[in-house]
Amino acid sequence: VEASIPEPQREAWKKFQAKGFTNKEEFEREVVRHVETTLARSMFNCDETAAYAAASLALRDRLITQWNRTQQRQTFADGKRVYYLSLEFLMGRALDNAMLNIGAKDIAKDGLADLGFRIEDIISQEHDAALGNGGLGRLAACFLDSMASLNIPAWGYGLRYRYGIFKQEIVDGYQVEVPDYWLDFNPWEFPRHDIVVDIQFYGNVRKYQNEQGKNVITWDGGEVVQAVAYDVPIPGYDTVSTNNMRLWSSKAASGEFDFQKFNSGDYESSVADQQRAETISAVLYPNDNLDRGKELRLKQQYFWVAASLYDIVRRFKKSKRAWVEFSDQVAIQLNDTHPTLAIVELQRILIDLEGLEWDEAWSIVTKTFGYTNHTVLPEALEKWSVPLFQNLLPRHLQIIYDINLYFLQTVERKFPKERELLGRVSIIEESQPKMIRMAYLAIVGSHKVNGVAELHSDLIKTTIFKDFVRIFGPDNFTNVTNGITPRRWLHQANPRLSELIASKTGGLDFLKDLNILNELEKFVDDKEFKKEWAEIKYANKVRLAKHIKTTTGVTVNPSALFDIQVKRIHEYKRQQMNIFGVIHRYLTIKAMTPEERKKLAPRVSIFGGKAAPGYWMAKTIIHLINQVGSVVNNDKDVGDLLKVIFLEDYNVSKAEIIVPASDISEHISTAGTEASGTSNMKFVLNGGLIIGTCDGANIEITREIGENNIFLFGNLAEDVEDLRHAHTYGAHNLDPDLAKVFDAIKANTFGDAGSFGALVSAIEDHGDYYLVSDDFHSYIQTQALVDEAYKDQDEWVSKTILSVSRMGFFSSDRCINEYAETIWNVEPLVPEPQERNG
Ligand code: Z2T
């Protein structure tokens, strides 16, 4: 407020307010201006990189204006805001998305053409913002798009990693990791050097009585690191609402101490301090569904959570409201347990710094937080060693112990006879060393816990969190099935399909209300429509085939059935079962006569995905896929009947090419292990069918599109436990077809069998935890049904049209509306019409 311009001078500001562009000529003028001034170049040295930079700068000028106005409007309205805390935001590219969302793509396309560039070439210059591992991070990105598009006042809070998820190269069939340094030129972020928060680590806690005789607790004496805010505008689709994503970057606190070191000649240690501070936000941990318990990771979590809460609390305090109103102004959603320390930090702020009583503070805290669980895999549930935690965050440990004490007291009162219950639900696990169970802390500190698909939400209630459902009652646990943004995953990735849909449903409104896709149902038998539909799928396959050719050198036939499995490589996702199935297919083809081969449906098996760098089994799976590819793709007997492709460095921008090109995609996790999956939704929305298990959101996709339109197979979640026991205590009889596959591997058909020993013996000798053998027969049979079904192209196309028409439920807009109503209790803040026009 102090920095505001006085009333008499405001006229000048209004007169000269930033305008940006509104038509093609103005866009061109802005691009040329940025090339010639901001970039200090000219038409004689303007390559595609420079054109990308200038186009982005022109576009962002318009974003900034509507972003500032949105923030002003939200501040004046003084209503409730949502804060989405996520350690990962897998945003992908921004330029295309920004152009489409603000409705400037046609202008930009024509303008760039006038200036000598093709818009696709310019778009593809952009480096992906890859601050995430997989589903969880991409979900956060879809949520930001939906919250802005629905005009919900919301901020994302995350870390500004200097290195995103590593880039994957395939060298001699092996994964090699290359660092992803992405910040060289990033026009989408705005450093806020004035928004800096000091974050403390280590040190000591002191308890004493102040002059008023009140007990005071202080925490000091440790290391201090600064958090600097970097803001990224998040434009909504067809609205001027532009939300904010605030990412924190770490740097050394430049206090006198450093100067002393520096001047006293201790230059090296001064630089070392600097680097230690910068290390906090240096790199994204590359594990998907795995917790490693590293100290630096805990530092990242506290650094980010403390900076975000300081920011949120500061904003609240400006409104001069009473603390009891905090949760009327603030809803904080925890994206998995990674930000659970926020619960403890808010309690600390309220009792240690603001002087509230424990109970009053705790009631505010629990009304503020919601917790989303994304997995039931035990190895992914976060636990922190108490000694490690105590050293880094001594005051927070005390508060956790107090939270636990009060919690266990209420449990004891409610279930006085159940002594073992206390140990089971204690936030502290009595192991050696003791461990803090972060999921339990998150549940105790939140008013709502949700899973991400129906089966998953049921599973957490009946397995890992069962005791907590008894303690807090079933109303504290709910389901919000995941969704995806149709803007990026239909309109942007598949513009021709989007255009066709628009032509039949009366424009692009379906992008805001995805249930409008229903109207496509009446075209399932429309010859002309089906022809266009099929042509679009074919064109998308041609595009992917070109990508495959340029990146792998392999020629694939776009008329073949494209069978795609792209996702992080993990044993529970069972890429190994897929490649064993491919080997089975190869052996079958080899055993056929030429006549028999003629009847077979040609297939291209496409894989993609990163293995965590320390996950040897996952890396072995990648190696096997590549080895099978090099044998199969060069076998003259096979020809076009089977090709096996591993696409290097699967990421968001590559997904935009891959997803629209599938005939079948594979979502084949062991039942009960994949919380939701979201690429399943993307593939179906783009006119592909699914082969999958009864797991995650596959089940709801089936409910929506009908079981005739999906290829389900395999054992059910309810039977998994018994089957595992049968392996452990009985004889594990290997499926005979799988045995043949293993024989081929052992005969060195795909190179040295020794390389794949671990993969085979996990199934043969070590209990087959993921039930590959149990599901193999059903999988192979179902793949045969896919082959049969694909031969009837007319029927196949009808299935895909019907499926797309029934996918409305899976919009992340539906999902965000559910969060807004059932968890956050926030309302949209719709811009005034005059703001919408300029
Ligand atoms: C992740 O991507 C997911 C869960 C995690 O649990 C961690 C990561 Cl990095 C800790 C995924 C689930 O595996 C997937 O089923 C789900 O669709 C996605 O989160 C979004 O909810």
Image (cartoon, grey):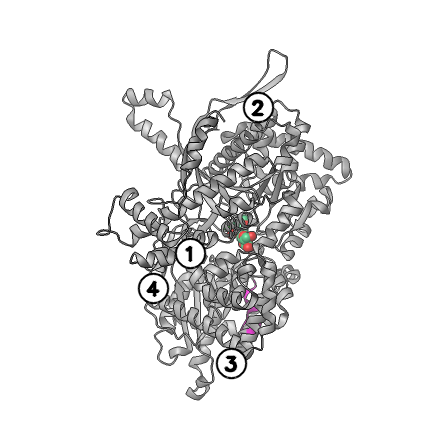
Query: What is the CA distance from the residue labelled 3 to the residue labelled 1?
Result: 39 Å
Secondary element at tag 2: helix
Q: Earlier in the sequence, mark 4 or mark 1?
A: 1
Q: Amino acid at mark 4?
A: Thr
Q: Is residue 181 visible?
A: yes
Secondary element at tag 4: helix
Q: Earlier in the sequence, mark 3 or mark 2?
A: 2
Query: What is the CA distance from the residue labelled 3 to the residue labelled 2?
Result: 70 Å
Q: Say if the magenta span includes residue 836.
A: no
Pointer 4 residue: 551
Q: How many marks?
A: 4
On screen, residue 256 versus residue 700, left or right, reads: left
Spot occupied by residue 275 in the image (x, y as percentages of width and height) = 35, 34
Q: Earlier in the sequence, mark 3 or mark 4?
A: 4
Q: Of residues 409 and 324, which is closer to you in this image?
A: 324
Q: Of residues 571 and 99, which is closer to you in this image?
A: 99
Which quadrant of the structure image shows residue 266? top left
Disc 3 crowd, CA 10 A, few/some/many (<14, 14-19, 20+): some
Number of the label disc, if any, that sits on residue 333: none
Q: Amino acid at mark 2?
A: Leu
Which is the main secondary structure of the residues drawn in magenta?
Answer: helix
Asked if the residues shown at circle 3 and circle 1 are in contact, with their CB atoms under 8 angstroms apart, the answer is no
Which region is colored magenta? 771-782
Spot occupied by residue 287 in the image (x, y as percentages of width and height) = 47, 49
Q: Answer above or below: position of 548 versus 185.
A: below
Which quadrant of the structure image shows residue 191? top left
Q: Earlier in the sequence, mark 1 or mark 2?
A: 1
Pointer 3 residue: 791
Q: Amino acid at mark 3?
A: Lys
Pointer 1 residue: 105
